Image (cartoon, rainbow, N blue to C red):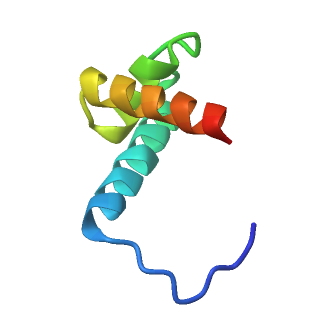
Amino acid sequence: MENKENIIIHEQARRVIYNVVKFCNEEKKEGQKISTTSATERAVASTGYSKTTICKIRKEGRKFRRLG
């Protein structure tokens, strides 16, 4: 992994990162909670954002990928 010095991670991003790490630790202790076939549901559970928000972001990502 590349070492990125002097990177600024804002509060909102820090919260998302914390939620993802917390989700991963819980799954490590308790086993997998959500099927790996549902990426959206796993994203909802791991980030703490709503399904609507995750779906909007996924749609934006597909659009950006098409545009190159």
Q: Is residue 66 left or right of residue 14?
A: right
- Give the residue displayed 27% in from the left and 60% down from the top: 12
Q: Quadrant of residue 66?
A: top right
Q: Is residue 12 visible?
A: yes
Query: Could you tell me if residue 44 is visible in this image?
Result: no
- Nearer to us in this view, 29 or 54: 54
The image quarter in which residue 18 lies: bottom left
Residue at 35%, 40% in the rendered image? 47
Furthest residue to the front?
Answer: 67
Where 60 falls versus 52 (above or below)?
below
* Whether residue 25 is situated above or below residue 43 in the rendered picture: below
Specify the quadrant that holds the C terminus: top right
Picture coordinates of residue 57 (x, y %)? 40, 34
**Which quarter of the rendering shows the N terminus?**
bottom right
Q: Residue at x 35, y 60 (%)?
A: 13
Residue 52: percent from left, percent from top: 26, 22
- Going 44% across and 24% down the picture, which residue do you hit? 42
